[in-house]
């Protein structure tokens, strides 16, 4: 059984007086290993910047905190600190990421051959991994022939297989159909690490443990219940 929150006794993310320049006033927060935390707020309040800072390994990343993929991560101007816990490796997903190295290759081929971030897998092992993300029926399809929802799920699977223990998901259900969203939810439920997800999806957020709210007034606060804001941030 996956332990949630403080029951694990291990911190995955620690923010101390963290201020995102021009976006967010200083705040403190802790995320425990195994927790599911949804990051909510209006567009333009700094949510994606926050994920990007963590995706790079935090304020002063050490080798053990380097991301599991080679996606280019722009620096995030900030003061204070955001630190990752021991043996926490971030895996960052955003709908805008492009993966030309996956084009023209079937899902089984990609998993079987592996790459510099993950070992290759035997066919049966690869099939089980695909099944967890609802992709078993698409195993012989090329990545570029998949629907947007299938591509999103496969990218998150690759992050997991590459050793990510902290999944940072930026709008993971954006433009996904219900089948894809349910498959992603089921896969994340089985994931043993920590999940931080920026989302505007009320259905997707219903199973999260707690919520980090980025307010229109540049404040950040925690809540046990979702707080939905519909106004855009003004700068």
Image (cartoon, helix red, strand yellow):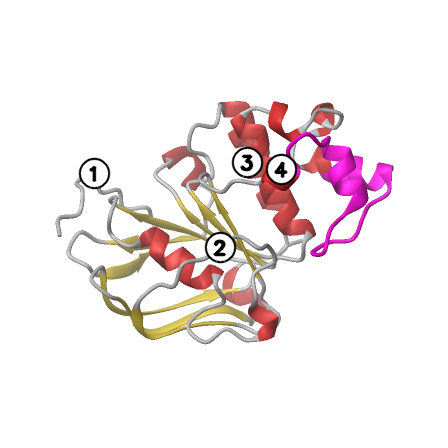
Which of pointers 3 and 1 lies earlier in the amino acid sequence? 3
Query: Label 3 crowding class (10 Å Cα cut-off): few <14, some 14-19, many 20+?
Result: many
Front-lying residue, 189 or 197: 197
The reply to whether dot 4 and dot 3 touch (C-beta < 8 Å) is yes
Residue at left offset 22%, top offset 59%: 23
Question: How many residues crowd mark 2 within 10 Å: few (<14), some (14–19), many (20+)?
Answer: few
What secondary structure is marked by label 3?
helix
Residue 107 part of the magenta segment? yes
Cα–Cα gap, marks 2 and 3: 18 Å
Q: CA distance from mark 3 to mark 1?
A: 26 Å
Give x and y (percent) for residue 77: 31, 67
Q: Which residue is mark 2?
A: 72
Residue depicted at x 59% and y 38%? 100
In this rendering, would 75 be left or right of 71? Answer: left
What span is in magenta? 102-129
Label 1 sits on a secondary structure element that is: loop
* Marks 4/1: CA–CA distance: 31 Å
Question: Contact (CB < 8 A) between labels 3 and 1?
Answer: no
Q: Quadrant of residue 174?
A: top left
Q: Nearer the viewer, mark 4 or mark 1?
A: 4
Q: Secondary structure at mark 4?
A: helix
Mark 4 vs 1, N-terminal side: 4
Q: Which residue is mark 4?
A: 154
Which image quadrant is residue 127 in? Answer: top right
Q: Residue at x 76, y 25 (%)?
A: 140
- Residue at disc 2, secondary structure: loop
Tell me the mark number nearer the camera, choosing from 2 and 3: 2
Query: Which numbered tag is attached to residue 230?
Result: 1
Q: Which mark is residue 152?
A: 3
Q: CA distance from mark 4 to mark 3?
A: 5 Å
Q: Residues within 10 Å of mark 1 (few under 14, many from 20)?
A: few
Q: Report the residue at 17% width, 40% height from top.
A: 231
């Amino acid at each position: 059984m996956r332990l949630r929150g403080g029951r694990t006794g291990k911190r995955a993310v620690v923010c101390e007086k963290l201020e995102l320049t021009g976006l967010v006033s200083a705040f403190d927060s802790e995320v425990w290993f195994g927790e599911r935390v949804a990051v909510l707020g209006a567009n333009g309040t700094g949510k994606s910047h926050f994920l990007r800072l963590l995706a790079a390994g935090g304020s002063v990343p050490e080798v053990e905190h380097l991301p599991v993929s080679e996606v280019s991560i722009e620096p995030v101007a900030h003061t204070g600190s955001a630190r990752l816990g021991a043996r926490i490796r971030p895996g960052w997903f955003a709908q805008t990421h492009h993966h030309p190295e996956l084009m023209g290759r079937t899902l089984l081929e990609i998993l079987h051959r592996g790459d510099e971030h993950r070992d290759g897998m035997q066919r049966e092992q690869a099939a089980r991994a695909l099944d967890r993300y609802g992709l078993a029926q698409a195993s012989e399809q090329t990545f570029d022939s998949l629907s947007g929802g299938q591509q999103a799920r496969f990218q998150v699977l690759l992050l997991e297989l590459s050793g990510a223990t902290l999944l940072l998901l930026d709008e993971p259900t954006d433009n996904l159909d219900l089948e894809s969203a349910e498959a992603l939810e089921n896969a994340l439920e089985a994931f043993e690490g920590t999940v931080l997800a920026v989302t505007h999806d009320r259905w997707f957020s219903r199973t999260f443990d707690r919520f980090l709210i980025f307010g229109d007034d540049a404040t950040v606060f925690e809540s046990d219940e979702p707080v939905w804001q519909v106004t855009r941030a003004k700068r």
